[in-house]
Amino acid sequence: MASEKKTPQITICIPHWQVRGLMTLCLRSIRKHSQKYNLEIIVVDNGSRDASLDYLRSLSWIRLIERPHESFANWPENVFTAWDHALPLARGEFFVTMHSDVLVKRDDWLDPFLREIAAGPLVAGVGGWKLTLESPLYALQKQVFGTAVAGIKRLLGRRQRSSWKTGHYPRDYCALYRREVLLQYGLSFCPGSESITGGYPIARRLWTSGFETRVIPTGEIASRLVHIAHGTAALAAEKPLNHKSAQSKVEQRVARLFAEPWVQQLRDEHILDAA
């Protein structure tokens, strides 16, 4: 996948459990748009029992780690342990955590990550904040509502609890870390006693160890990546969201994405699976 001049090596690690439709698109999009990078792709399968595991086994250009004793019952903990498990086995200078419901859209998708991590040796983690994939009308309504609520809170002199954290740490749907720093300080992706997941625990541990993290502007991320938050819930019946309305919205988001021409093209590009 890489030529001799492609440095540094970057390991991308993606946990998986029985979502071939999304994982196929995720992997093909990475391969299609990463010719300029020196990548190692690790997929950690958390006990799949369907044809998706056979599909992953057929891909000679990924490193597949099988954990047959895992299952959806251990989700989401086994997402974090998958990254912990792969970290010492990886070969890359940098380690990218990624979700299977992330799709790459551009050939320069990793450039902002590499730019920010190169700012100095104390920058040990970079990534984006939340991305949304929703109808324009719903996005506008949410923005207007959020602005109104924030204005009311300011008028009342109230501050949202833990508001300082918002937007200040890389979300783990796609975040890049200095692998040796994580190994040297024995840092884990698992939340532990932390009540916030999504990248906050590992960021806080980096801060405590004397390092810093950086958040890439959302516009730069959104032009390069699509993240269907909770996208696996639309395809894995065993992992539905708690509320019917939320489940319906994520299913609609996935359906809209799958209908887009560039995604349909990815679904037809079987050549991207070949060695």
Image (cartoon, grey):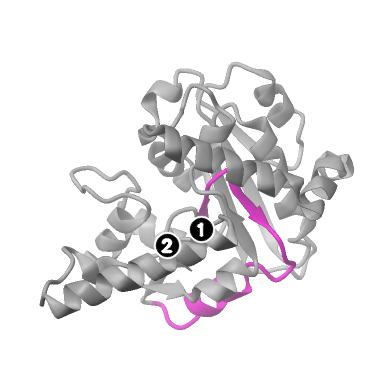
Please state the horizontal and vertical placement of residue 223, each as a whole percent of the image. 64, 70
Q: Amino acid at mark 1?
A: Tyr
Q: Secondary structure at mark 2?
A: helix
Q: Are marks 1 and 2 in contact (CB under 8 Å)?
A: yes
Residue that label 2 marks: 142
> What's drawn in magenta, residue-wise?
96-121
- Residue located at (51% from left, 58% from top): 138
Residue positioned 15% across, 71% down in the render: 159
Task: Indicate the amino acid at tag 2.
Answer: Lys
Q: Pick the residue in front: 87 or 157.
A: 157
Classify residue 254 as left or right of residue 173: right
Q: Which mark is residue 138?
A: 1
- Which quarter of the image is occupied by the C terminus? top right
Image quadrant assignment for residue 236 = top right
How crowded is the residue under tag 1: few (<14 C-alpha within 10 Å), some, or many (20+)?
A: few
Q: Residue at x 37, y 55 (%)?
A: 199
User: What kind of element bears circle 1?
Assistant: helix
Alpha-carbon span between mark 1 and mark 2: 6 Å
